[in-house]
Amino acid sequence: MAAAIAGVFQPEMQNLIKESKVLLVGAGGIGCEVLKNLVLTGFSELEIIDLDTIEVSNLNRQFLFNKESVGKAKSHVAKTSVLKFNPNVNITSHLGDIMDTKYGVAFFNKFKLVINALDNKKARSHVNRMCLSCDIPLIESGTMGYSGQVEFIKKGVSLCYECLPKSEPKSYPMCTIRNTPKEPIHCIVWAKFLFGQLFGESDEDVSVDQTVYDGTETKVSARQWAEIIEYDPKKLLEKIFYDDIKYLLSMESMYTGKKVKPVLLEPSFFETEVVEYRHVLDSEVLTLEQCKSMFLDCIVSIKQKLDICQNKSLVWDKDDDDFMNFVVSSSNIRSAIFNIPLKSHFDIKSLAGNIIPAIATANAIIAGQIVIHALRILSGKYERCQSVFLRELPNHKGQILVKDKFLQKPNPKCMVCSTDGEIVLSIDINNITVKQFEELILKKKLNMVAPDVLVDGRMIISSDEDDELDLYEKTLAEAGVNHGSRFSVDDYFQNYSIKIMLQHKEKAQEEDPDFEIFGNLEELNTAEKNNEAEPEENDEDCLIEKDESCVERVDDDLSTSDEQAHDMVTDKKQEDDSVIKEDMMDSDPEVIKVDQEISNEEILAMKRKADEASEDINEAKKSRVD
Ligand SMILES: Nc1ncnc2c1ncn2[C@@H]1O[C@H](COP(=O)(O)OP(=O)(O)OP(=O)(O)O)[C@@H](O)[C@H]1O
Ligand SMILES: [Zn+2]
């Protein structure tokens, strides 16, 4: 089935297709489709990289793989499969991480075009930087359920991947989770934390500590108490769903205003016999009595698993029936206490596992569009490579595949693709070590791989192991960093530099964010003024983050249409403050807001343009929140 492109394309284009070396990053859902399309279109010089091996769950949509491929490298199997369609193609496959330093500038420079078919922001940001640095056009893509998008990225020509703020995974205030849940998801998140607290490494404690009356009245953690009572299911039930609730109710001030007060379950609930629940379909909602019975049963089974587990710590997994039952039963009992509707096993599994099913058709449509972009890029028609969006529902014109009217220009204030990138870091210099600064801010937040840092001309972090700087365990203050110091940060691997201006801000209380990043000083001052003017009544400072494990990148609300050309407007909720706040003591960020600066004036100007261009501005405002 070798590609026959003679007669389809002009001779010059045929040569470009045959000779242009293309790198495909990711051989998953979109990657497999793209590879097949490239090969069938006549592309003949391809390299593909993926760090993963094939799992059974990939087989429903990653059709270059079959049962025999399970456990083998995705990139190698994908290569072998497509060679059957067209054996005249030269494909090199790599089993590896694209962020590995062996895939540096020399590797990227070989390619005429790079295509991202990835599933995480970190790798996407990295490839974005490599392509900007090598000035290679990049096609960025993503799908989520029925939605998807394709974007063209070229240095100085278009927006880069990091030009606009990205929506962060949905997060919930920790205080809401602990004390004032309002929606089923709050109880589901709480139940997962409870699992961690009782059986695993606790991220957050959601059940109160206990006093043990053993003559000494010792205060012990809920986990220690559970061990003391040998995970007696009935005692746990009573503690979690009665004693803890009574404790919450004792804190009068907690339930002022609109906050829903929990209602104590009748003591008889804890006494009654167990009922049968196993016949209930996953799509049906259990009764409260059935939830109780399920809870009692799964505690016994989980305890058995804990006993045989070597390190005495379990990790919650949606695919373990007992673990899942724990979350179903305990989240539903808590919902009943807070007058929140109960949910079915099926719904809770989707919410708890953050599962958005991958749709093969969405991947196929996006992959088709990627190849159309690739052809336009090769023929230099950059202006025709506007972003394309696959919508879950048709727009007012009945279209599901819509594109921006114009190619968006780079954001002059982008901290990645603009030449004068400088950001302001507000942090307590006595409360962070040089090592934490490197790991949590430079690598984790700013996506660098191997940074070198000079402060006021003095090196404090080096990517060269031979440089023995010996400062890593020191705080920034001890390493000679002051309020107003300027960091010059270079990542030679990514060929990326940024200046960071440091503002010392004492961490007054535990809940204060450990650091904040602002686009510039003006923004910092505005944020500070706002803080002074309106102290946040809410519990925003103790947010937790939802898993994003299964979510590929995509616009949350793809309501773009042809006319809604300039809707690079972010969702109004996000544009309020372009700040990153993060708790660096946790491995996971506690609070994240969007980074990078787009001034309000710019946003207004964009909105005005969108107004002019669109018949339906309301729809436009909702879109583009990736
Ligand atoms: N840093 C990286 N280097 C190389 N490949 C990567 C990197 N990060 C992610 N990938 C690959 O990108 C692909 C993305 O594909 P996809 O979104 O379909 O994910 P998947 O893991 O195949 O499916 P799912 O997550 O739904 O089970 C995966 O095969 C993944 O291994
Ligand atoms: Zn940019």
Image (tube, rainbow, N blue to C red):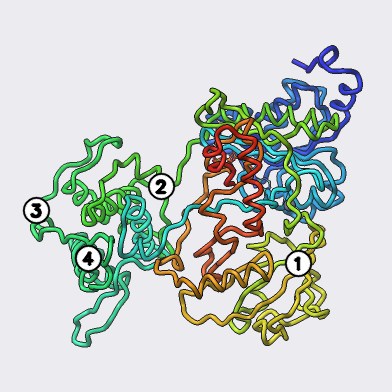
Sequence-wise, the earlier of marks 4 and 2 is: 4
As drawn, 253 above or below 298: below
Q: Amino acid type of disc 1?
A: Pro
As drawn, 160 above or below 493: above
Which label sits on residue 278? none
Q: Amino acid type of disc 3?
A: Thr
Q: Using residue 17 as the reference point, say whether residue 40 is left or right of it.
A: left
Which label sits on residue 318? 2
Q: Using residue 360 as the reference point, say whether residue 354 is left or right of it.
A: left
The residue under label 4 is 245
Give neighbour class at mark 3: few <14, some 14-19, many 20+ (Cα, 10 Å). Answer: few
What distance separates the C-alpha of mark 1 from that of mark 3? 62 Å
What distance separates the C-alpha of mark 1 from that of mark 4? 49 Å
What distance separates the C-alpha of mark 2 from that of mark 3? 29 Å
What distance separates the C-alpha of mark 4 from that of mark 2? 26 Å
State the residue in front, 234 or 252: 252
Residue drawn at the location 13% of the way across and 49% of the way down: 274
The residue under label 3 is 272
Between circles 1 and 2, the one closer to the viewer is 1
Residue contact between numbered discs 1 and 4, judged by CB atoms under 8 Å: no
Q: Position of residue 552 (x, y in %)?
A: 57, 43
The residue under label 1 is 451
Residue contact between numbered discs 2 and 3, judged by CB atoms under 8 Å: no
Give neighbour class at mark 1: few <14, some 14-19, many 20+ (Cα, 10 Å). Answer: many
Q: Position of residue 139 (x, y in %)?
A: 73, 38
Give SS at disc 1.
strand
Sequence-wise, the earlier of marks 2 and 3 is: 3
Give SS at disc 4.
helix
Give SS at disc 3.
loop
State the residue in front, 71 or 394: 394
Task: Quadrant for residue 454, please give it.
Answer: bottom right
Asked whether residue 567 appears in the rendered view, the answer is yes
